[in-house]
Amino acid sequence: MVEFSKEGNLGIITLNRPPANSYNREFIEAFGTAIHQAAADPEVKVVLVRSALDRFFSGGADVKAFSENPPHANMAMVRRAHEVFNGIARIPKIFIAEIAGHALGGGLEIALACDLRFASQGEYRLGLPEVTLGLLPGTGGTQRLPRLIGYGKALELMVSGQTLSPEEAHRLGILNRLYPDRDTLARETRAFAEALGRGATLAIAHIKRAVYEGLDQPLEEGLRLERELVEALFSSEDGQEGVRAFLEKRPPNYRGR
């Protein structure tokens, strides 16, 4: 139901649980295993999270399973989902959600846990409509969406259960990039990811750490972390190579160290 594969320096995590990639505990465990495989492979520099299904990125949690499970079992899955999704922020590689179908509830929360979200135009919806079930977005949505688009609009979307078109989600900043069709999405996302993979991956890893850890700290502590990380880059092979290449007017040859 979740598969990990590798193409060059790209890791690819494919969600494949028809009909809607709705997730249960088994799905979450499989997603966690795929994330671990991507993180542990030194050849993988960037990770794409995509769906094998035409209509859905993910429809979110399996509501039928929720209805059949006792609350303690549902909460065990929620806690495990938090562990798995939170792990993405600690991995020094960029994760890109490639969205070409419905991303609803926990499905959008998977995408929000990724670092970037690229999508295609289409007749599908994105949103956190859990309130319509008498619930709240319980696998990161109440925390990640406000951090991404601001408290006011995020709160409005969550308390109303409103869903968005890809164009609306892009205008709000939920989606980083929006392409006209699936083929363009796949081609351009791959090109972007491969370019990152050939680039200054050590600096990219440090930027990711500075952003995620710094936002959870007071400004002065975030600036202290920034100084610590840039100092490490000044001493790194990649940092020295980048400066030399600039002065010598040639492309840099980064090695990730």
Image (spheres, rainbow, N blue to C red):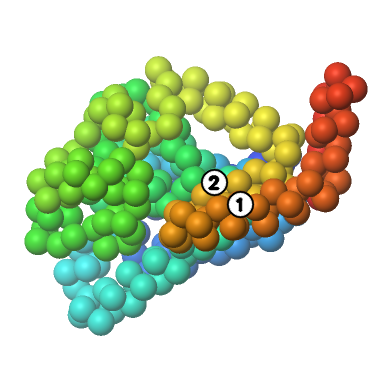
- Cα distance between the residues tagged 1 and 2: 21 Å
**What is the x, y in percent for residue 148?**
35, 44
Residue in the foreground of this view, choosing between 117 and 121: 117
**Mark closest to the chain's N terminus, 1 or 2:** 2
Residue at 31% from the left image edge and 57% from the top image edge:
143
Residue at left offset 43%, top offset 27%: 177
Q: Residue at x 65, y 52 (%)?
A: 227
Q: Residues within 10 Å of mark 2 (few under 14, many from 20)?
A: many
Please state if 22 lies on the left or on the right of 158 as rendered: right
On the image, which quarter does residue 248 sit in? Answer: top right
- Image position, residue 20 (x, y; %): 31, 47
Residue 149 occupies which quadrant of the picture? top left
Residue 175 falls in which quadrant of the image?
top left
The amino acid type found where label 2 is placed reads: Phe
Say which residue label 1 marks: 226
User: Taking 71 as reference, is 14 above or below it?
Assistant: above
Left or right of residue 256, residue 91 in this image: left
Residue tagged 2 = 95
Residue lying at the far front in this picture: please name it: 220
Between 23 and 117, the one lying in front of the other is 117
